Amino acid sequence: MLIPSIDLMGGKIVQLIQGERKALEFDDFDYWIERFKKYPLVQLIDLDAAMQRGDNRELVAYFSQRLPCQLGGGIRSLESVDAMLQLGVHRVILGSSLLRDGNVDTDFAQSLAATFGSHRLVFAVDSRHGQVAIEGWRQPTSLTPAEMMNELEPWCGAFLYTHIDTEGLLQGIPMTIVRPLRAATDRQLIVAGGIRSLQEVATLESMNIDAVVGMAIYTNQIPA
């Protein structure tokens, strides 16, 4: 399954390269809603909230009421999960809040699942140079993606793996990296990070892996 990505920053849709340099910017929201409404799921990320420098709450509400969305960015508590679900998102994505002092916070993950149901939860595993990175990808950890997934699997409906090394570069995502991750979990596995062609999406689908696509759609390399 191809999952289009909408990243929000400063009240606009943006595309960043490796989470740092802005490459594209759009404010024609209804145009993208029209293009994406045929998809069963759209990924919505509030980058400002993820980086703890404000939020795009009004835009989140606008998109989530018009598209079936899973939302990530700055969601760090039971209260914030509840607030986002109240806005109409289908699922919430949590990442940094699942780690405490460098270790997986299984107590928090368990409380999330008990409160909202694992089917409403997507746990983000973002990796740079083979290690999980948190806090808007700025803080490295000693965990590997497979280690984090292994500890969290009982309490989520899906994992979202982002390969930061290729994010936004349109160089493709390395299958040698994502294939072992498919073997590491029985949950839905969604991957992102430089996916650039429908052939790549099809290859991932043949492995029972779903693909988040951003830059390739916004630069018209993948029709949407």
Image: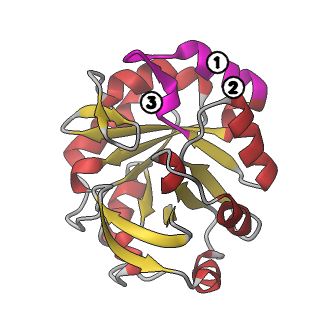
Q: Is residue 114 inside the magenta stretch?
A: yes
Judged left or right of residue 147, residue 39 is: right
Crowding near the residue tagged with mark 2, few <14, some 14–19, many ≥20 C-alpha atoms within 10 Å? some
Question: Along the polypeptide, which appears first: circle 2 or circle 3?
Answer: 2
C-alpha separation, residue under disc 3 versus residue under disc 1: 17 Å
- Left or right? Give the position of 222 relative to 62: left
Among the 4 quarters of the image, the one containing residue 156: top right
Q: Marks 2 and 1: in contact by CB < 8 Å?
A: yes
Front in this rendered view, residue 188 or 169? 169
Q: Which mark is residue 185?
A: 3
The reply, left or right, for residue 213 in relation to residue 170 is: right
Q: Is residue 198 visible?
A: no
Task: Provide the secondary structure element on which disc 1 rests.
Answer: helix
Q: Is residue 81 in view? A: yes
Residue at point 38%, 28% (across, down): 184
Q: Amino acid at mark 2?
A: Ala
Residue on which the image places disc 1: 110
Q: Residue 162 in the image: state x and y as whole percent.
A: 36, 47
Q: Which residues are magenta?
A: 94-115
Q: Nearer the viewer, mark 2 or mark 3?
A: 2
Front-lying residue, 85 or 40: 85
Residue 77 lies, with reference to residue 196, above or below; the image says: above
Which amino acid, by three-letter code, is at mark 1? Gln
For marks 1 and 2, give the CA distance: 5 Å
Which residue occupies 30% across, 43% down? 178
Label placed on residue 50: none
x and y percentages locating residue 186 in the rendered image:
50, 31
Q: SS for tag 3?
A: loop
Circle number at residue 113: 2
Quarter of the image for residue 21 reads bottom left
